[in-house]
Amino acid sequence: MRVLFLFLFLVTGTAYAQDNWSSYYFPVDASMATDYQGVPAETFDSGKSVLEPPAGIHGFNAVAKRHFSFTDGTRARFWGTNLCFNASFPEYDQAEILAERIAFFGFNAVRLLHMDYSFEPDGIFEGTSGRLSANQLKKLDYFIFQLKQRGIYVDMCLLSSRSFTEADGVPAAALLGRGAKGTAIFDPTLITLQKQYALDLLTHLNPYTKMRYCDDPAIALVEINDDNTLAGFKPSTLPEYYKKEYNEMLDIWLSEANRRDAYEGSQLSLTPEIRSWEMEKHAKTSMLKTLGQNEVILYVDKVTPTPWHLQFCVGGVRLAKDFEYVLKFSAKAGHPLTIGAETQQHFPPWQNLGLNRNFDLTDKFQTFEVPFTATEDCDNAKVGFIVGFETGDITIKDVSLHENVLAAEIRDFNYSLEKKYLNQMRAYLRDDVGVKVPIGIGASANPAQLSLQEECLDYVDHRAFWDLPALPDKPTDMGDFRILDKSIFTNPNRGILSIIAGPKGGAKQSPWTVSEWSHCYPNQFAYETPLLLAEKARQNDWDALFQFVFTSGHGAEKTYDDIHSFFDINANAQQLMLCSFAGRLFLNNDKRPPFTFGITKKCAILKFGNQTIKVGSIKNTDSGWTPEGKFNWGTAPTLLSNN
C-alpha cells in the first residue's frame, strides 16, 4: 500500500492551538495501555513485526556495496534510539522492563552514549581513574543480554563525556572539560587512555552471552567518539599545557615543505573581478557605472532613506561556516561619504553571513582589509557594497575575498591531525582489539567533518535537531529556556528538513546514518517528524537512524506519564506511537507496511484497515508558559490533543 504524504506549510504559533485534551500514556507494561481513539495498545506493538531475535542471527554487521549488510547477505537497517548516562546500567529487574519497552515500540537498535560520563553508580568507571567498575559491568552485561534476546542491536560509543583525571596521569585534567573536546584528538596521553578503555570494554567477556563484546554480532556498530572534532576548533581556548603542545605540532607541520610560503602564494580570490559585478537597485533609486582596469566608478544619482536599496554586488560565492575570511578593497569618493560591505544569502530570507560594516571614504584612495567569520554554510552567498547612503561618485578597485591565510593553515593542520587520529584509532580497534563491525564516530554539528568520515571511517554519520531549547539565563533552571515553537516546514534549510535532503555533492559512497535526531519538546509540532523522517530515509536508502533519546536515566526510565525532558520519550506517548509506525516504514525491507499517513496543521493522521487515528500535540497536565516567560512543566498525566 502506498504511503501518503501531505507536505503542508504549517502556520506558526506561540502556544498550543488545541483547546481539548485527553489523558493518555503507556504504563510500565505498554501492552496494558488503554485504547487510543478506539484502537487497542497492541496496535503500537511494532516489535512483533520488525524484530528478529536474537540480535546477531544473521551474523556480523559489515559494509557491502555502500550499505550495511549482515554476514549472510541480509540487508542491515537500524531504527534505533539513544540511551544516555546511567540508563545503560539499569538494575536487573529494570533491565528487563526497559528492554521490553524498547522492543515493544519497534526499535531494533540502541546507541549507548555517555557511559563514560562519571564514576559508579552513574557511569562505568570505578574510583577516580579509568578502571572499569565490576558492578557496572555486571549491570551492562545483563542489560545487553536482555536487548539481544529481543532482537535489539547495540551501537557502542566509546569517548562521549569522560572527565579525565589526574589519577589517569593527565596534566591539567580539570581544565579539559567533558570529553576533552579537540584535545583528545592530538594529545598522546589522552589517545592512550582511549585505547585502553576500548580494549578493556570491548574484550570484556559478557557471562550471559558468553561472548566478548568484540566477538558478539549483537554489537552492530562501534564509535570512536561522539561530537569531538578539530573542525572549527579554536586552539586559543586550550589550557596552557595543551596550547604549547598543539603549537609545537603546528610549527613542525608548517615547516615541512615550506607550507607557509605555499599558502601565501596560492590564494585566489573567491569573488570574480569587479568588472563582472552587478548593480542592484530597489525602490526609486538611480545609479550608473563605468568600468576601468580592475575598478568601477559608480554614479549614485538618487537614494532613499534605506541605504541597501542601492548595492554593487556579486552572487554565487561559496562560504563555509566558522571559516575566517578577509575582504580587501580600495575605494574613494568625490566627496566624503559612507559605504557599507556585507555578506548575505543570495536568496530568501537573505540572512547575513558574518560581514556587515560601514566605511568612511574621502577623495583619496584608502585600502581596507576586513576580517570576518562566516556564520553559516552557503553555496550561493552575495558579497557586495551598500552604496545608497547618499548621492555622489564612488570608485572601488582591487577587490578580493580570501580565506584568512593563518586560518587556512590551521584548518588544514587540524584536518591532517584528525585524519591521523581517526586512522590510528580505527586501525587499533580493528587490528588490536578485534572489532569486526563498522567503525565510525558520532558526528559533530560541523559539516567540515563529513569528508573526514568519508575518507577514514566505515560510514558517515549526521545529526538533526529541531527547536533545540536555548538556555539564556540560568542553565540549572529547567523552566528558563526559549524555543521557536515553529513547524519544521518553516525553514527547509535547517534541522530535520536539511538532513532529509540527503548527501550533497552527488551519490553517497558510504553507509549513511543519523546517530541523533529529535524534534524537541515542548515544540507543539513534534508530531511532524518521526513518520516524515522514516519515509524519506527509506526513499533515500539510508542505513540507520537513532532517535535522541529514549531515556537519560537518573530515574527517568521509571517515569511513564510525566514529561520532564526536552529529549526523553519514555513518557512521551506521542513520540512512542509515531516511532512505532515509523520503524515499520524504515525496517520493512521488501514490502510496504499496511498503512498510510499524512501530516496536517494539527496532527499526524494514520490509516490502517478500517481504522484512522490522529496524533497531535502532547503536554503534561497544567503545563504551559507563564506570564514571566518561563515554562511550567506541569504534572502527570500526559495529555494528547483532541483533533
Image (spheres, rainbow, N blue to C red):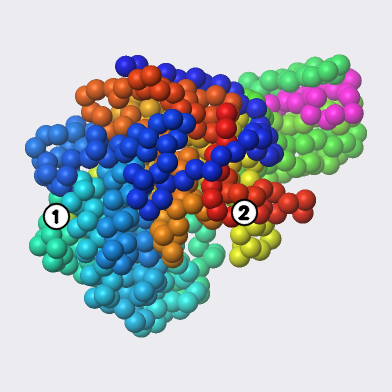
Where disc 2 sits, the SS reads: loop
Across and down, in percent, residue 236 comes to: 54, 64
Q: Quadrant of the N terminus?
A: top left
The picture quadrant where one finds residue 76 is: top left
- Residue carrying label 2: 634
**Above or below, 595 relative to 157:** above
- Residue carrying label 1: 216
Residue 5 counted in the magenta span: no
At a point 37% along the width and 22% down the height, the residue shown is 608
Across and down, in percent, residue 322 comes to: 55, 47
Q: Are marks 2 and 1 in contact (CB under 8 Å)?
A: no
Q: Main secondary structure of the magenta part?
A: strand
Residue 70 lies left or right of residue 516; in this view the side is left
Where disc 1 sits, the SS reads: loop
The picture quadrant where one finds residue 454 is: top left
Across and down, in percent, residue 422 comes to: 30, 54
The amino acid pointed to by label 1 is Asp
At a point 69% along the width and 39% down the height, the residue shown is 14
- Say how many tags the image has: 2
Nearest the camera: 120 or 418? 120
The picture quadrant where one finds residue 131 is: bottom left
At a point 17% along the width and 37% down the height, the residue shown is 69
Q: Quadrant of the C terminus?
A: top right
For the residues labelled 2 and 1, the Cα–Cα distance comes to 44 Å
Across and down, in percent, residue 283 comes to: 83, 18
Q: Nearer the viewer, mark 2 or mark 1?
A: 2
**Above or below, 539 relative to 42:** above
- Please report the bounds of the magenta region as a residue range: 294-313
Nearest the camera: 607 or 384? 607
Within 10 Å of disc 1 (Cα), the crowding (few <14, some 14-19, many 20+) is: many
Nearest the camera: 121 or 160? 121
